[in-house]
């Protein structure tokens, strides 16, 4: 699993996910006062954001897509 996005309709702007995301994937939108997943490809899949979100606003994908290495050269 990996973070896909933060559901903006559910997000209450508490910042719990932002404060626990050591990978820097989740940022706070200062205008909207809500969390956003700006760098989902960098998700470390620790799932702390999901566990701590009181609004269940963190949307995860079933699998983390990792680019395939195609050549050595």
Image (cartoon, rainbow, N blue to C red):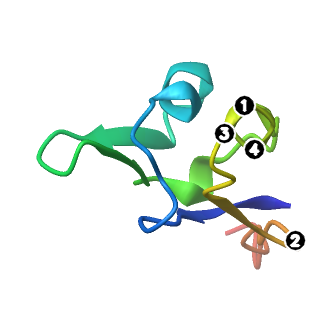
In this rendering, the label closer to the viewer, 4 or 2? 4
- Marks 3,4: beta carbons within 8 A: yes
**Upstream in sequence: badge 4 or badge 2:** 4
Between residues 47 and 70, which one lies in front from this camera angle?
A: 47
Q: Tell me if mark 4 has few (under 14), some (14-19) or many (20+) residues whose alpha carbon lies within 10 angstroms of its own.
A: some
Alpha carbon separation for disc pair 3 and 4: 5 Å
Which quarter of the image is occupied by the C terminus? bottom right
Which quarter of the image is occupied by the N terminus? bottom right
Q: Secondary structure at mark 3?
A: loop
Task: Please give the label number shown on residue 63.
Answer: 2
Q: Secondary structure at mark 4?
A: helix
- Marks 4,1: beta carbons within 8 A: yes
Q: Which residue is tagged 3?
A: 53
Q: Tell me if mark 2 has few (under 14), some (14-19) or many (20+) residues whose alpha carbon lies within 10 angstroms of its own.
A: few
Which picture quadrant has residue 61? bottom right
Alpha carbon separation for disc pair 2 and 1: 21 Å
Task: Please give the label number shown on residue 52.
Answer: 1
Vertical arrangement, residue 52 with respect to residue 40, above or below: above
Alpha carbon separation for disc pair 4 and 2: 15 Å
- Marks 3,2: beta carbons within 8 A: no
What residue is at 56 percent from the left and 57 percent from the top?
A: 40
Between residues 47 and 56, which one lies in front from this camera angle?
A: 56
Vertical arrangement, residue 10 with respect to residue 65, above or below: above
Task: Please give the label number shown on residue 50.
Answer: 4
What residue is at 52 percent from the left and 66 percent from the top?
A: 7
């Amino acid at each position: 699993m990996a973070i896909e996005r933060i559901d903006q309709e559910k997000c209450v702007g508490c910042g719990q996910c932002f404060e626990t995301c050591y990978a820097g994937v989740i940022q706070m939108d200062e205008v909207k006062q809500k969390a956003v997943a700006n760098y989902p490809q960098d998700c470390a899949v620790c799932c702390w954001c999901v566990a701590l979100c009181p609004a269940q606003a963190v949307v995860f994908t079933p699998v983390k897509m990792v680019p395939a290495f195609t050549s050595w050269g």
